[in-house]
Image (cartoon, rainbow, N blue to C red):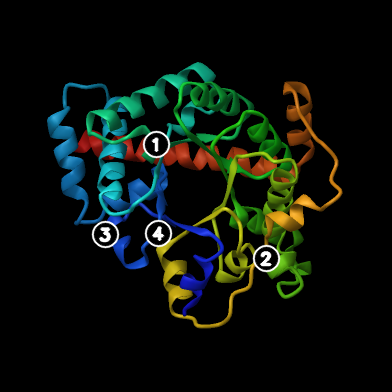
Amino acid sequence: MNQLEALKQFTTVVADTGDFRQLAQFQPRDATTNPSLILKAVQKPDYAPLMQQTVERHRSAELDEIMDRLLVRFGTEILGIIPGRVSTEVDARLSFDTSATIARAERIMRLYRAEGISPDRVLIKVAATWEGIQAAARLEQQGIRTNLTLLFSFCQAVACGQARVQLISPFVGRIYDWYKKSAGGQWDEAARAGANDPGVRSVRQIYQHYKHFGIPTEVMGASFRNTGQILALAGCDLLTISPELLAELAASNAPVQRALDPAHAAGLDLPAVSYDEPSFRYALNEDAMATDKLAEGIRAFAADAIKLEQLLKAV
C-alpha cells in the first residue's frame, strides 16, 4: 500500500487543481479550485477551447458573469470525474462586501443548477474575513454550502464554527512560508518539520477545538509545501493536495500513522472561545502572520481574477 492509499484510510483526499485531466489517476473524492488554478489551466492548450466556447456562448453578458460561467464550466467538468464535491470561489474583490458575496454565490449556484448539478455537490469558497464569514452564515441558512478559505488564524476558525459553515481550509504552507521568512537565517528546518511545523500546529489546534466542542464544520488542511506537512495531519477530516504532491505520496510505500484523532481531542482540557465582531477584528489584528497572509492572499486572488478577465476580453 502506498502512502496515498494509506492516507485515504484516515482522511478524505481532495485534489487541489483546475487541471481536471489529472484527476482520475489519483481518485480523490473532492476537488478544489481557485482563480489562480483556473488562470493556470486556461493558458494550457487543452483547456483554451473551454474558455473560447464560454465567451462565444455568452458574449453579450457582463464580464463578471462570463467569468462565473467559466468557473462553473470547469467545476462541471470536474464533477464528471470525481464522486464528491467541487469548491468554486467567489471573486476575491468582494471579500469585504457581505451582500455582494451572497449575490455572487447565489448566481454561481443558479449556474450549477442550470447544468443539472445538485447543490450538495458544490461548495462556495469565500475568504474568511468577518464579512465573508457573515455571508457564509446566511448562505448556509439558504442551503448553500460554503468553504471558508484564506484561513490562517484560530480566531477565523472559531468564527467559522460559530457561523456553522460547512468546511474551512486552513492554509498550512502559507503559514510555514511566513514563519520561515520571518526567522531568516535563524530558521531550523529540521526542528520545525512534521508535528512542529507552524502550519501543522495551527491546523491541529483548530481540529482539536472543533472535535472537543462538537463543532460539525469540516477541517480541510490546504496549501502544502511538502508531504511531511500532509502526513503530520493524517486523520484531519480532509486534506486538499496538489497533483505534484499526490504523485509523491503515490510513489512512496513508507508507513503512515494517524496523527489527528477525534477521540483524543474530545478528552483534552480546552477553554471555550467565541468572538463577536470587535473581538474577532482585534484577535486577527494581534496575529501578524494571519493579518499579512490574509491580505496577501486576497490581493493575489484578485490580481489573478483581473488577469483572467483580461484573457476573456481577448477571446
Q: Label 3: state its secondary structure.
A: helix
Q: Label 2: state its secondary structure.
A: loop
- Amino acid carrying label 1: it is Asp
The residue shown at (33%, 53%) is: 82
Q: Nearer the viewer, mark 2 or mark 3?
A: 2
- Amino acid carrying label 4: it is Pro
Between the C-alphas of marks 2 and 1, the distance is 29 Å
Q: Can residue 72 be spotted in the picture?
A: yes
Residue underneath mark 4: 28
Q: Position of residue 15 (x, y in %)?
A: 42, 57
The residue shown at (23%, 34%) is: 116
Residue underneath mark 1: 120
Q: Around disc 1, counting alpha carbons within 10 Å, would you say few (fewer than 14), some (14 to 19), or many (20 or more)?
A: few
- Amino acid carrying label 2: it is Ala
The front one of 303 and 241 is 241
Q: Label 4: state its secondary structure.
A: loop
The earlier-in-sequence mark between 2 and 3 is: 3
Q: Nearer the viewer, mark 4 or mark 1?
A: 1
Q: Can residue 181 be spotted in the picture?
A: no
The front one of 9 and 105 is 9
- Amino acid carrying label 3: it is Arg
Between the C-alphas of marks 2 and 3, the distance is 31 Å
Between the C-alphas of marks 4 and 1, the distance is 17 Å
Q: Position of residue 150 (x, y in %)?
A: 57, 42
Residue underneath mark 2: 259
The earlier-in-sequence mark between 1 and 3 is: 3
The earlier-in-sequence mark between 4 and 1 is: 4
Q: Nearer the viewer, mark 1 or mark 3?
A: 1
The earlier-in-sequence mark between 2 and 1 is: 1
